[in-house]
Image: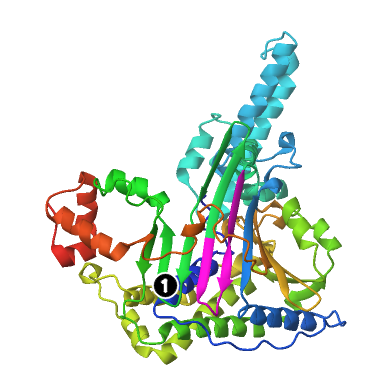
Amino acid sequence: MKFSTQSPFSVKPLAISTCLLSTLLLVGCQSMPFVQPSSPTALSTAQTPAAAKTMIIKAQQQQRRQSLAYHSNIEINNDKKFMGINTDKLMATGDDVDSYCEHKHDQDYIALTTEAAAQDKDLSDAIYDEKRNALKNTYLACTSNYRAWRENQNDYADDYLEHYSEAYDNTSSDENTETASVSPYYEKLFSEYDTQPTKLSVKKQQLLDAYLLKPLSIDVQGVYQPLAGRFTMLPSAQYSARNHHSSISQPIYVDAKSGNIYLWADNFAMFNASYLDDKLGTTWKSKWLKIAMNDGSLPKGFGMALVKSHFKAMDDVYAQADTRQFEFVTAQSLNNMSPKLPAHQLQAMQKSSQIIRRLQDEISYEQAQRQYYSTLYSLIGQQYPELIKEADNTVADDDKKVLTSKVIVQQGLAMMKNMFEEPDDTDATDSSNQVKVFVQDLSGLDSQGKLLWQHQRLPLSSIASSKQASTEQVVIDVLNQYAPIREQDSVFPNLPSNMQIPSAQNSVDLKDYSQALTEYYRDGHGTAVGKMIFNMLPMAKARFGATD
């Protein structure tokens, strides 16, 4: 599903770190040397922020070298967008503050007309004179205050004034408009209008919750074996409503030793057969697609250096974090979170000896992101200055390049640099009027200080609407649970036992396949859609020229 790209708590660190470290690690990365983890230490009885920070750092460092199975669950909560809101008392009438006075006048006029009809009276009857005059005066007061408020915004719009002044002829003068001040009531109403819900927006949130968020479930599970250089993912999405049940998953197998990524072919076979390869048939049935990343274009040892640099950057970010962000909390306190935690997540989270919370506001969270990118970029640059130099002087004509691991790394480094060099979008002049929004990380540990689970609550509201109270934010709850790997459990429960591990017999090398497919098109075969796509691909052009 699609998330807002304007979130102040961007998911870019997770996305880029995952993509960079699950792709770039593979370019010749060997398994990490075994380092005997330090002996478990008893949990500190001093429940101080410093003790909480030290404990979580040690737990994360220890976990890096341990094989484990994991399960991630993602839930999106928009309850506060509609629950407990009395739509009859909402002040905002529409999405646009410029049309508020007219909308308000129309609604009041309709209400008065309905009242007269219920009494079998005509609205022009003398008994409604007082109410009609009150309605008119309210409208005039609204438009007069709006004009004055607009002038104070430095974006005064003549067309709006012209529109309002024609609504009632000869009822107000330009002189009155120019000298009118804004009442406190209207100042608050107009200034905060964009952050106020409307009946329509509340209804939309109710429909979103009922027909998408509640029936939808997103999960990722797999195993992490650093010493074997093995990492698997099984992302899945399920939608379960009264008359509709559907599910989709995508097995992914990462072999860091050989530098290969394997994708189960089923989800791609139908599209490929329909639009690209009209001779494919069922040859991809029960097959893995092999993507070889270790093409020799990167310096030797780069994969290992990237992993170590990533961990070093993460350690530096945590070491420099404000100790006051960390604290021990009780399992009982999890019941009091607002919005409430999903019931199935809460049940798993309460089964731990210690719970540590880290709470960051928008500014500190963004600073931590920038620090991570900056540190990782600097560490890579110190070891491989040629990659940084080439990334900063990328040839503009990308069509002349062949896509290699080195090109991918250079693009990733350029993106990383933009992350920590881009200007801060936060408006410092307005910060005093904004309600702070926080991102919360919770970690559950056993009696030996070992991580059992980690939970993150991430607000999805935009900076423009951060004036809203934090209880009105849409939030995403992500729970990661960790457990020992059990031999009796299948890595991919939805695949046959003989397909759990990719091999030369059950996989298709995409490099060889793409070359054969390109030659097929070069010989004049293929679909119309495929010909258009191949003519746009830099690699196909460089190797074979344009297809007819």
Residue 494: x and y in percent read 53, 52
Amino acid type at mark 1? Met
Please, is residue 406 above or below residue 384 in the view?
Answer: above
Please, is residue 5 above or below residue 122 in the view?
Answer: below
Residue 119: x and y in percent read 75, 11
Q: Nearer the viewer, residue 208 or 448?
A: 448
Please, which residue is most extreme toward the right here?
A: 45
Query: How many discs mark residues in the rendered view?
Result: 1
Q: Which residue is mark 1?
A: 415
Query: Image quadrant of residue 127?
Result: top right
Asked if the magenta segment contains residue 226, the reply would be: yes
Query: Image quadrant of residue 347?
Result: bottom right
- Residue visible at 51% across and 72% down? 230
Q: Nearer the viewer, residue 192 or 246?
A: 246
- Residue visible at 17% across and 54% down? 520
The kind of secondary structure element at disc 1 is helix
Please, which residue is most extreme toward the bottom here?
A: 382
Magenta stretch?
A: 216-233
| Structural crowding at the residue carrying mark 1, measured as other residues with C-alpha within 10 Å and reported as few (<14), some (14–19) or many (≥20) | some
The overriding secondary structure of the stretch rendered in magenta is strand
Q: Is residue 364 left or right of residue 54?
A: left
Residue 192: x and y in percent read 65, 51
Q: Nearer the viewer, residue 290 or 212?
A: 290
